[in-house]
Each structure stands twice: as C-alpha cells, then as structure tokens.
C-alpha cells in the first residue's frame, strides 16, 4: 500500500464532525450558488471566501463547543434555557430550510449523474433518495460516519478542475482580499445566498449533535449526563473544526474561480443548475485536449459525492432539532426500533424534499433560494448561539473566549446587514 494512500486512510480515521460538516457545507446548493456568483459577477464576490473564513470557524466552533460541554444538541440547550416559542420558531426555521435544501440537492445530484450516465432523471432521484435513507436508518453510526468521511474526497474535484484552466493569479489574489460591493438587488441577493450557504443553520445543529454522538461513542458521558475528559476533547474539536472549515472554504474559492474564469469570461452569466455549470465547462476549457471533458466529469462527480454527504446531514440536523424539542430519543447510534420519531423525521424531510422536484420549480432558483433562505434564517439563530456560547451559567468554565465571541457577534451583524440590504434594494 502506497504512503499516499496510508496518509488518506489516516486522515479519514481522525476526521471528526468538523471535517464532515465542512465538506457537507459545499453541498449542491452551495456549488450552484458559488457557480452562479462566479458566472454573474466574475471575481467580484471572491473576497467573501477569505473574509468569511474566520467567522465560519468561530460560529461552528461555538456550536460544537455548546454540544460537547452540555452533552446535548443545540435544540435541547435552547429548550432548557429559553421559552417554547423561541424553541419552536428556531426548529421550524431549520426544518423548512433543510427540506428546501434537500429537495434542491437531490435534484442537482440527479442532473449531475445524467451527465455521466444516460438514466431517467426521476429514476436517479429515487435511487439517491432510497440509498441515502437506507444507509442513514439501517447502518450503525460508527459504520455510517466512516461512509460519510469517504465522501470528503469529493472536495478534491474542484481544485483539480480549477488547475485544468489557465488562471490570472494576480487578478484572483487581488479579488480574494479586496472587497467589492455593488448596491444592487442582484448583488445583495446572491451575496446573501453565499452567506447562507457558507454559514448555514443546519451546520449549527448537526455539528453540535455530532459532538454528542462522538462523546457517546467514546463512552465519555457520565450517568448524570455530564461529559468527562472535556479538556482534551475540546482541543481535538478545535483542530477538527478548523481543518473542516478550511477545506470547505478552499473548495468554494476554487468553484468561484473556475466559474469566473470559464463561464463569466465567455459571457455565460446565468446557469440553470449545478449540473449546467459542469456541462458548460466542456466546450470552454482549452488548456489541453479533453480538459473540458475531464473538468465536466470532475465537477459532476463533486456534485454527486458532496450531495450524498450533505443530504443525510440536512435531514439528520432537522431530526436532531425536532427530536430534542419533542423529547424523543435521538441519535444515529440508536437502532430504528428505539428511535421511531427521530428516523421518522429524517424520512419525512427527505421524501418532502424529493417531492419538491416534481412541482416543476426552476432548479437553479430553488438552489439559490435555499441558500438565501438559509442566510435570513441564520440571523436569529446566530443571536442565540452567541448568547449561549458566552454564558457562564450554561457553559461554565468552557464558555467561548472574547475573540471567539466577538467573531460570532460580527457574523450575526454581517448576515443581518446583508439580509437588510437585500430587502432594502428589493423595495427601493
């Protein structure tokens, strides 16, 4: 066995909830949104990846810390310390946003698969839906988490595709660090989508609950419900989270660059689906023979692989949120017969998402709308995360530090202003 392969296996072995969450962030909805911003604005919104990275790390670390310290998911912590109206408002937002996202992702996966194999669109959607549900419901958490980790490799499709094309690196580096803002509805609509698909509510709930799953699998939780060995666990959590968010933003950065260089430069400023972004690469890449075909195939492979990773995360996070709110048994470590409600929510959310694709809604509109909805829904959730993570009563000696807390509040402010800017330019 080669040294490179051994390194990959070692990486996958230590990969935790942070890395899986980061990879799931680049789901088909995210890929479509990043492709659309590159096609529509060129490198104009590329700066958002670098500027959002520290905010993303801080938010996800705060959510993961909340879950680990309390040995409870985010919904359970909100339920314990806030009233029911707040709880069900939050859970409702997550369920609606995730269901829309699931539908958009399943449709995008089927479209991408059609680029590789000539099979009916509806049959592909049914195949992906059934496969995901069977794995999520009937495979043990330990085995299932290993399966999810393998899909992380799909992230490599985008840097590889990007390097198949000549890139104006001077222009790209300038656009990466120097912000560019246009005061138009189109700009604020797409940037809100970028914010929403980068810092998404489902990630908050998933990573918090998955840290609890990790503690359970390591037998860290005492009989009274409190976790032991937190100091070392939190150090590992921070490293895992940082690597996961870095991988996520690097892949998103590559997608924007690729769509900017290839699509925007060629005058393709609007795309129908994430699969259309892949299809558009084929005739427009001229670096060497078959480069376009390879780029198209890689792009499509990334959409499918990351969709297979993201849909379970979306349905799972919705189920964690609702199950904790309703006092149902929850956790992928439980068998179906011991957690009917938990797996029922996963099934219902996934099937409703599938059915959305039969309503003849424009697929790109659904993908970008899902991202924009996430961007708006994240605002009240970020307020709660910032309050909880800094609370001495809830987090005790493990509450977030001043720097982390400041970054989370900054994220709240940025996403609030982006949403306000979008609505203002809409009615202006």
Image: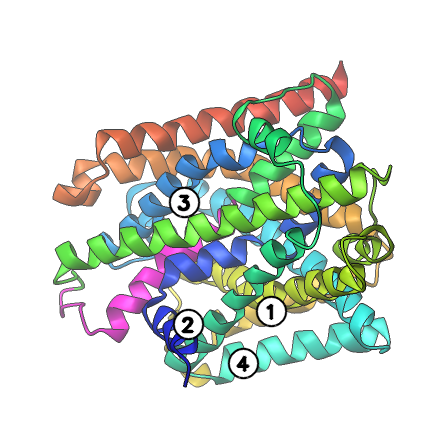
* Secondary structure found at label 3: helix
Residue 29 among magenta residues: no
What residue appears at the point 66 percent right and 56 percent down from the top-left corner?
A: 161
Residue that label 2 marks: 8
Instruction: Specify which label sits upstream in the sequence, 4 or 1.
Output: 4
- The alpha-carbon separation of the residues under discs 4 and 2 comes to 23 Å
What residue appears at the point 41 percent right and 45 percent down from the top-left corner?
A: 84
- The alpha-carbon separation of the residues under discs 1 and 3 comes to 33 Å
Q: Residues within 10 Å of mark 1 (few under 14, many from 20)?
A: many
- The alpha-carbon separation of the residues under discs 3 and 2 comes to 45 Å
Q: Give residue 308's mark.
A: 1
Q: What segment carries the magenta color?
A: 200-224
Residue 407 drawn at (x, y percent)? 36, 30
| Residue 425 against residue 85 in the figure, above or below | above
Instruction: Specify which label sits upstream in the sequence, 3 or 2.
Output: 2
| Residue 10 against residue 232 in the figure, above or below | below
Name the one closer to the observer, 225 or 259.
259
What is the quadrant of the C terminus in the image?
A: top right
Quadrant in the rendering for residue 290: bottom right
Residue that label 3 marks: 84
Residue that label 4 marks: 135
* Secondary structure found at label 1: helix
């Amino acid at each position: 066995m080669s040294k490179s392969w051994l390194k990959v296996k070692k990486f996958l072995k230590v990969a935790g909830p942070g890395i899986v969450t980061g990879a799931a962030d680049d789901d088909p909805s995210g890929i479509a949104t990043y492709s659309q911003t590159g096609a529509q604005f060129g490198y104009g919104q590329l700066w958002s990846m670098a500027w959002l990275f520290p905010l993303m790390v801080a938010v996800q670390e705060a959510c993961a810390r909340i879950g680990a310290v309390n040995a409870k998911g985010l919904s359970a912590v909100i339920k314990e310390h806030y009233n029911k109206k707040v709880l069900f408002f939050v859970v409702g937002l997550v369920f609606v946003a995730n269901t829309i996202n699931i539908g958009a992702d399943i449709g995008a996966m089927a479209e991408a698969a059609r680029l590789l194999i000539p099979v009916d669109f509806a049959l592909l959607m049914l195949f992906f839906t059934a496969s995901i549900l069977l794995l999520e419901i009937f495979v043990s958490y330990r085995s299932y988490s290993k399966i999810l980790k393998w899909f992380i490799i799909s992230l490599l499709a985008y840097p590889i595709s990007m390097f198949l094309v000549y890139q104006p690196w001077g222009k790209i580096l300038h656009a990466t660090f120097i912000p560019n803002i246009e005061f138009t509805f189109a700009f604020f609509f797409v940037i809100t989508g970028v914010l929403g698909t980068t810092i998404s509510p489902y990630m908050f709930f998933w990573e918090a609950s998955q840290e609890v799953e990790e503690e359970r699998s390591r037998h860290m939780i005492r009989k009274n419900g409190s976790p032991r060995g937190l100091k070392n666990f939190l150090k590992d959590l921070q490293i895992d989270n940082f690597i996961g968010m870095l991988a996520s933003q690097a892949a998103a950065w590559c997608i924007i660059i690729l769509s900017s260089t290839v699509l925007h430069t060629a005058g393709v400023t609007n795309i129908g689906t994430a699969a259309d972004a892949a299809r558009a690469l084929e005739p427009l890449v001229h670096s060497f023979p078959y480069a376009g075909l390879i780029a198209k195939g890689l792009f499509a492979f990334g959409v499918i692989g990351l969709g297979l990773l993201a849909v379970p995360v979306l349905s799972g996070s919705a189920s964690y949120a609702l199950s904790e709110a309703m006092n149902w048994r929850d956790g992928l470590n439980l068998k179906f017969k011991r957690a009917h409600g938990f797996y029922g929510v996963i099934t219902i959310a996934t099937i409703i998402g599938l059915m959305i694709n039969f309503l003849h809604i424009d697929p790109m509109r659904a993908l970008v709308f899902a991202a924009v909805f996430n961007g708006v829904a994240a605002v009240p959730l970020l307020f709660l995360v910032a309050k909880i993570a800094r609370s001495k009563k809830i987090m005790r000696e493990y509450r977030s530090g001043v720097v982390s807390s400041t970054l989370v509040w900054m994220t709240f402010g940025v996403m609030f202003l982006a949403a306000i800017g979008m609505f203002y330019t809409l009615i202006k």
